Image: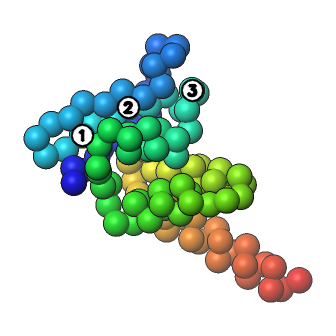
Amino acid sequence: MKQAYIEQVALDHGAKVVFKEFADHVRVAYDPDQISPLDARGVLGIYVHYTESPEIDRIRDAGSTAEDENCREFYSIILGEIDRTGDAPGIVRHVLGLMEQAHSEERGR
């Protein structure tokens, strides 16, 4: 299994995802104006057996198997922010904080 490094870039129209394999990893670039972060990973998965990290893999897997389109979009937004910032731990902490806040507000009603 190869380590994947995924980033967002502006690509020419029609080039949604590009990747290059190396001996121990794969570099991936996708255009978020043309394809979602979740779908870009789905395309990559057709060609390469890869991992990003256990946490990001779980987010990707949850989004890929979600039956509800809103859930898929939620996971795709999280992945997009991870790709945009390169700060997976920070994004996950932020999302969890927002979810805890929303849950607390909901309980307080």
Type of amino acid under label 3: Gln
> Label 1 sits on what residue type?
Val
Mark with earlier residue (2, 3): 2
Circle number at residue 57: none
Spatial distance from mark 2 to mark 1, Cα to Cα?
A: 10 Å
Report how far apart the C-alphas of labels 1 and 3 lie in the structure.
21 Å
Looking at the rendered image, the quarter that the C terminus falls into is: bottom right
In this orientation, does residue 37 appear?
no
Task: Name the residue: 39% across, 54% down.
Answer: 87
Q: Position of residue 38 (x, y in %)?
A: 52, 46
Describe the element under mark 1 as helix, strand or loop.
strand
Residue of label 1: 26
Kindly state the secondary structure of the residue where label 2 is placed.
strand
Instruction: State the residue position of label 3.
Output: 34
Q: Amino acid type of disc 2?
A: Ala
Q: Position of residue 83 (x, y in %)?
A: 43, 44
- Image side of residue 104 versus residue 76, left or right: right
Examine the image and state in which quarter residue 88 appears.
bottom left
Dot 2 alpha-carbon crowd within 10 angstroms: few under 14, some 14 to 19, many 20 or more = many
